[in-house]
């Protein structure tokens, strides 16, 4: 799911980057810039203004269901990431502890660090996406305005629909950035394990090195 950037020129420029490794690597940064722009600027979808009052009411209900589904996805992803960070840290610590000092050990340690960093970013993004947000088209004030009818009712429906769509875009952006961080973290973690295996093959463990020195 690509990051949805709207309104801001910088966001559009970032979203226009060629699809590839660079875009995947900085997706959490792009998400943060995109969502910051969505919070700062007044969101208005021209298609929403063309809907009838009945369609706007139906849209608010459907968008509420979509918000719940996105929250559930983020919750599952965040729970899985929390376990992945713990397991990845233990594996990295165990593997590095058995390696003697060499450039391969340094490269392996750096690679594990980058993998853990991506996983931690995914956790942070996931938890941020789970923060409670306002619910639109709900509450006594909304019902009172609906009962008044006329322009007040229509303006409130349009404002609620725009705010709901904006929040769901932000949720979707966070889910996309968290998933991208997971993918990057897992790929780099696998590469780190491969480097660790190479280090074991081409460099003796510390215990063997110490025994060799003692025998001399």
Image: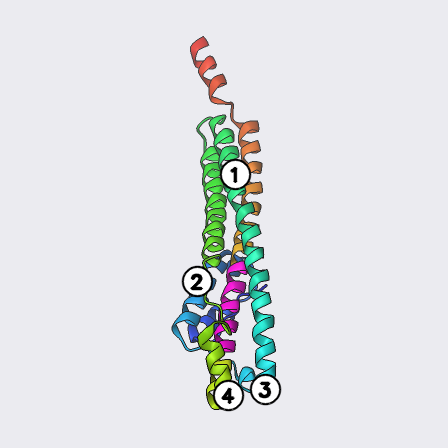
Describe the element under mark 3 as helix, strand or loop: loop
The correct choice, above or below, for 198 with respect to 168 in the image is above
From mark 4 to mark 1, how far is it between C-alphas?
Answer: 57 Å
**Residue 7 visible somewhere in the drawing:** no
The correct choice, above or below, for 111 with respect to 200 in the image is below
From mark 3 to mark 2, how far is it between C-alphas?
Answer: 33 Å
Question: Which residue in the structure is indicated by mark 2?
Answer: 32
Closer to the camera, 122 or 159?
159
Local crowd size for mark 4, using a 10 Å CA cut-off: few (<14), some (14–19), many (≥20): few
Q: Nearer the viewer, mark 1 or mark 3?
A: 3
Residue furthest bottom in the image: 150
Q: Which residue is depicted at the point 50% across and 88% down? A: 149
Question: Which residue in the structure is indicated by mark 3?
Answer: 52
Q: Earlier in the sequence, mark 4 or mark 2?
A: 2
Question: Which residue in the structure is indicated by mark 1?
Answer: 88
From mark 3 to mark 4, how far is it between C-alphas?
Answer: 13 Å
**Residue 173 included in the magenta stretch of the image:** yes
From mark 4 to mark 2, how far is it between C-alphas?
Answer: 38 Å
Q: Earlier in the sequence, mark 1 or mark 2?
A: 2
The secondary structure that most of the magenta stretch takes on is: helix
Question: Which residue in the structure is indicated by mark 4?
Answer: 149
Q: Which residue is depicted at the point 53% across and 66% down? A: 3
Q: Nearer the viewer, mark 4 or mark 2?
A: 4
CB under 8 Å between callouts 3 and 4?
no
């Amino acid at each position: 799911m690509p990051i949805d950037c709207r309104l801001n020129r910088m966001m559009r420029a970032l979203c226009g980057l060629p699809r590839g490794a660079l875009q995947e690597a900085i997706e959490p940064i792009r998400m943060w810039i995109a969502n910051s722009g969505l919070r700062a600027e007044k969101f208005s979808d021209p298609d929403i203004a063309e809907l009838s009052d009945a369609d706007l009411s139906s849209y608010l209900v459907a968008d509420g269901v979509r918000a719940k589904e996105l929250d559930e996805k983020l919750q599952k992803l965040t729970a899985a990431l929390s376990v992945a960070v713990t397991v990845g840290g233990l594996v990295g610590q165990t593997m590095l502890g058995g390696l003697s000092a060499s450039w391969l050990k340094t490269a392996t340690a750096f690679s594990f660090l980058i993998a853990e960093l991506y996983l931690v970013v995914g956790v942070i993004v996931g938890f941020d996406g789970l923060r409670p947000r306002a619910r639109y088209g709900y509450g006594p004030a909304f019902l009172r305005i609906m009962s008044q009818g006329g322009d007040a009712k229509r303006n409130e429906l349009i404002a609620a629909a725009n705010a709901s769509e904006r929040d769901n875009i932000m949720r979707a952006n966070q889910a996309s950035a968290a998933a991208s961080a997971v993918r990057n973290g897992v790929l780099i973690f696998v590469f780190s394990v491969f480097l660790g295996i190479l280090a074991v093959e081409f460099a003796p463990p510390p215990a063997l090195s110490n025994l060799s020195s003692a025998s001399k």
